[in-house]
Image (spheres, coloured by chain):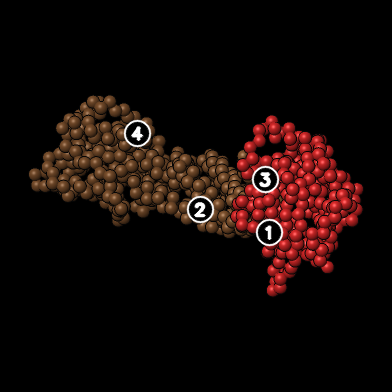
Chain colours: A red, B brown
Amino acid sequence: MSIIEVRDVKKTYPLGKVEVHAVKGVSFSIEKGDFISIAGPSGSGKSTILNMIGLIDKPSAGEVLIEDRPTSGLSDKELTRLRHEVLGFIFQSFNLIPVLNVWENIEFPLLLGRTKVSQAEKKEWIDWLIAEVGLGDWKTHKPNELSGGQRQRVAIARALVTKPGIVLADEPTANLDSSTGEQIIELMKKINRELNTTFIFSTHDAKIVDVADHIIRLKDGLIVENRRLNGADSMDQVKE
Amino acid sequence: MKFIIPRIALRNLSRQKKRSFLLGGAIAFGIMIVTLINGFAGAFIENVSENFSYLMAGHVFVQGAEKTASGKRLSVIRDDSIIFSALRDSGLDYEFATKTSEVSASLYFEGKTIRQTLTGLDLATNLFLRERVVLRQGSWDTIGPDSIILSEKIASRLNVLPGDRITASFQTITGQNNIADFTLAAISVDSSIIGSTMSYVDLAYINEAIGLKSGEYMALGFMLRDLKAAEPFAARLYTSMAGMGIHLFERSAGEEGTATTPFQAMMRAQRTEDWEGSRYSVYTIDDIVSQAKQIVVALDGASLVILLVLFAIVMIGINNTFRMVMYERIKEIGTMRALGVQRKEIKSLFLNEALFLAIGGAVSGIVLALIAMSLLSLIDFGMNTPAFMIMKNGHLSFFVPPLRAVFNVVIIAILTLLAAYFPAKAAAKMEPAVALRTAK
């Protein structure tokens, strides 16, 4: 079953008097539980595609379906609600809220929207996530008291706290050294297996791309490779 | 949202401590100045009334009036037993009563002359007057039947010294011209514009000079324990006297929209109304000095203008700061929006921060003003300062009406929210992808 379907999506940005065609028409689908890498060099359209799947940017043309729901006609309020309920985000620069400590940063998405979770249930879940990302001793620390790797672990726990079906990670290892980057990818993979959460991450690091079980490679806003590593290659669209 | 937005807003204030301190400090300073003015205005009317009542020797007054067969109006109380009887019947309590007569006279000394109102009262026994009138020269011990006490200003214009004999010319109550000689017993300190115009003489001596019989006088003043009791005292005395069949001039509330005091309105009614026989007027010190209330209104108006001008400047600062803050926190705005924070909650985050800043600044300003008031009220300016009339026992005194303080805080809160509204709206309108991309 496809959890995400991208249908002939294009994205054009105005840049001064010219238009930049960041994504030139791509189509692919993602299955539940996939661990997908969107790879490609800088400017190939990775982040733009992730933003459109993450409903924080709108396609200029085409359609993004999340859990079979078309998203193009939704209002900002509905998109925000859908993001909160279905999606989790991990950013390249961690993007933690500086005035909240580790526990509060992870708790933050649970305090938004209409989610009703009992205090005991919430505490148990957040404590489990903190233990899972290995930050049991750092609960009350503020982001500026943590290393880059630790901050990204907090971001992973925060992305998972609402139990989303999909987690989007835009270059999650770009600001980390290679060893920490590998640990973060390991952690994401482990959670992917344990919770069957779909992970979609963009990267241009070849070593990390190989960890994925589904690779979508981009160049100049087009898909040049769409391959499942379990053998069933799927070239939905390949354009040179 | 379970208070997460206000919690973040509050903590955000501590991120740029210096900036928050300066903005909050500007608000606090403005509120402090305005609260000090309000505090001064709040105590002004009471201080003026209280000090005036000591100079006039009473908080509540009963004045007698009589119309002769020829239609001439006399100011006289021939028999005060009926007034004291009314007081007893109504169970009213007072500290002491002072009998006074007043006459407008020309004072002469060695070719110099000056027009002056002479207030006659029992100089030998009026202890309250002795407490309030500070003597520059002479002594209360030298007071005799023909004594006169003049203020420094009047004494200087007449060029007189204690012991000098001054001649006064005036009209008796029936309109005859008369003269009397007085001995300058003491010169009082010019304690205020009003205080410097007061000249005191002995009641019995002036009564005889203006043609009043023994036991007669013009007005009876009651000094009460508390100025606030003046109005209820006057109202009950009026009712009691009216109940005893005594003819009274109706008490007036003054003339709306004019500078006329209730006392002036009552005096005008005595002249214009058709009446005969003897009548009484009951009035309070507030009825006489109510013009001072216009000064309070002016002070309050000035404080509101200062408040608005100060905060127009502060608003520009707040507006610019919040625009800057919006760009500083653009990544956070994008992150929050991505995580599921709605536009209105982003706006609320900024507005909450502005509100906390306004309330924090305003409350600090009020606290600073209260401290400043306490310190200022410790300074003893003495009883001989020109500003004596607006002070309480030679000290500055303040009273901030609580509702006025709340009003100031609300005004500041509204203005600050207004200043932060447009940056907050701009932050809320920002697309999450644009915010995140800009931050990169």
Q: Residue at x 66, y 33 (%)?
A: A118
What amino acid is found at the position of numbered circle 3 in the picture?
A: Glu
- Label ID, residue B74: none
Q: Quadrant of the C terminus of chain B?
A: bottom right
Q: Secondary structure at mark 1?
A: strand
Q: Marks 3 and 1, how far apart in space?
A: 20 Å
Residue where numbered disc 3 is placed? A85
Q: Are marks 4 and 1 on the same chain?
A: no
Q: Disc 1 is attached to a residue of which chain?
A: A
* Residue A57 % position (x, y): 69, 58
Q: What distance separates the C-alpha of mark 2 from that of mark 1?
A: 55 Å
Seen at 40% across and 50% down, the residue is B297
Between residues A149 and B256, which one lies in front from this camera angle? A149
Q: In this rendering, does residue B208 appear at all? A: no
Outermost residue, left direction?
B69
Q: Nearer the viewer, mark 3 or mark 2?
A: 3
Seen as rendered, the residue at the extreme bottom is A17
Mark nearer the N terminus (4 vs 2):
4
Distance (Cα) linking label 3 and label 4: 68 Å
Foreground: disc 3 or disc 4:
3
Residue bearing the label numbered 2: B307
Which residue is identified by label 1? A63
**To which residue does mark 4 refer?**
B229
Question: Given the image, on which type of amino acid does mark 1 rest?
Answer: Glu
**Marks 4 & 2 on one chain:** yes
Specify whether disc 2 shares its chain with disc 1: no
Chain label for disc 2: B
- Amino acid carrying label 4: it is Ala
